[in-house]
Amino acid sequence: MKILAIESSCDETAAAVVEDGRKVLSNSVATQIKEHIVYGGVVPEIASRMHAEAICPVVEKALDDAGVTFGGIDAIGVTYAPGLIGALLVGVNYAKGLSLSTGLPLIPVHHLRSHIASNYITSPALEPPFLCLVVSGGHSHIVEVKDYTRFSVIGLTRDDAAGECMDKAARALGLDYPGGVNLDRVSTDGNPDAFKFPRPKVDGSDYDFSFSGLKTAAVNLIHNASQKGETLDTADFGASYINAVTNCLCENTVKAAKDYGYKRIVLAGGVSANSRLREKMKEICLQNKWELFMPELKYCGDNAAMVGSQAYYEYLSGNVASLSLNAYATMPIDEQRN
């Protein structure tokens, strides 16, 4: 079964053709980093307008690269939640138009579910159940993946997401957008013990995260140094800060895995590309003799191949939408609306 998938939840306009949920025939992405870098982050209005400009050529390229026409496509999958509402609407309405004109079924895909599904592409032997740490600029979740379309959230952030936490600290340091990526890059040779940052805990919940205090501590440290005319070692600061964030992520994930009896651990989301997080999870899983699965780096960020993978399993479960499908800025991973 070949699915044409569309992704437009933030600042990447993407389309892909995926066969049977695991084989990527094409994966086309138009990025907007150059347009948003001057603002230090994504401007929703600009993102929406650029999606509208890019979506036709991106879809055409995905079909051409896969060597298929709409006659060779069996269904259309599209990200419909969560994300920037204007950006999502571009992809959803375009997919609805394609469904109406071609008669192909329309499959609604939750963005976090598709991030998890990126691992099915990288590791074709991977099957649920497993425990997944989903970490991105907007989300930090520990999720039980009971089946391809059955999820249960064990822990999540009470305030800021880990990726947003890294982005804000990077911006305060003067690093360009995307901050988290650049912070990881400049901290490669830094000392992770050079600066002491807090390790926030959530009272009464062993699996939930809280990153707002950690972010504030980092920003205050940077501003205080600037006011005193002092220069912080960027590599040491970045390494120490990333170490604090990843320690929080890993500690809660380990506790959840042990408490819930999981020995198969999966990483997903944009922050799963972070080098320190990947190294730390490898060490932890080796120590505990757990299996670890991580997406190939090119599938960590937003892309349509992961949407096509999850769309396949949504279709098999009977999740097909009508042309009244809407986009939603927020939606829990275990909820479905069509």
Image (cartoon, rainbow, N blue to C red):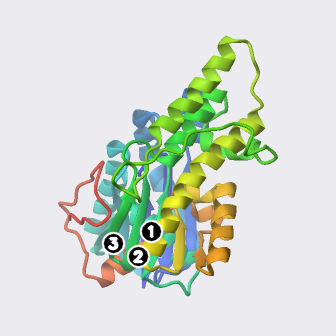
Q: CA distance from mark 1 to mark 2?
A: 6 Å
Where's residue 308, x and y in %? 44, 72
Return the x and y of residue 126 as percentages of the image width and height. 53, 83
Q: Is residue 175 above or below residue 78?
A: above
As drawn, the label of residue 151 is: 3
Q: Residues within 10 Å of mark 2 (few under 14, many from 20)?
A: few
Residue pictured at 47% horizontal, 79% vertical: 262
Tag 1 and tag 2, C-beta contact below 8 Å: yes
Image coordinates for residue 79, horizontal then vertical, percent? 37, 60
Question: Where 289 sits versus 82, above or below?
Answer: below
Quadrant in the picture for the N terminus: bottom left
Q: Of discs 3 and 1, which sits in the foreground?
A: 1
Q: Does residue 112 appear anywhere in the picture?
A: yes
Upstream in sequence: badge 3 or badge 1: 3
Quarter occupied by residue 235: top right
Write down the quadrant of residue 335 in the picture: bottom left
Q: Residue at x 29, y 50 (%)?
A: 330
**Which residue position is annotated with label 1?**
256
CA distance separating discs 3 and 2: 14 Å
Mark 3 vs 2, N-terminal side: 3
Label 2 element class: helix
The disc label shown at residue 260, or none: 2
| Image quadrant containing the C terminus | bottom left
Percent position of residue 139, x then y: 43, 52
Which structural element holds mark 3? strand
Do the residues under discs 3 and 2 have CB atoms within 8 angstroms? no
Q: Nearer the viewer, residue 245 or 4?
A: 245
Q: Amino acid at mark 1?
A: Ala
Please state which of the two labelled residues, at mark 3 or mark 2, is closer to the viewer. 2
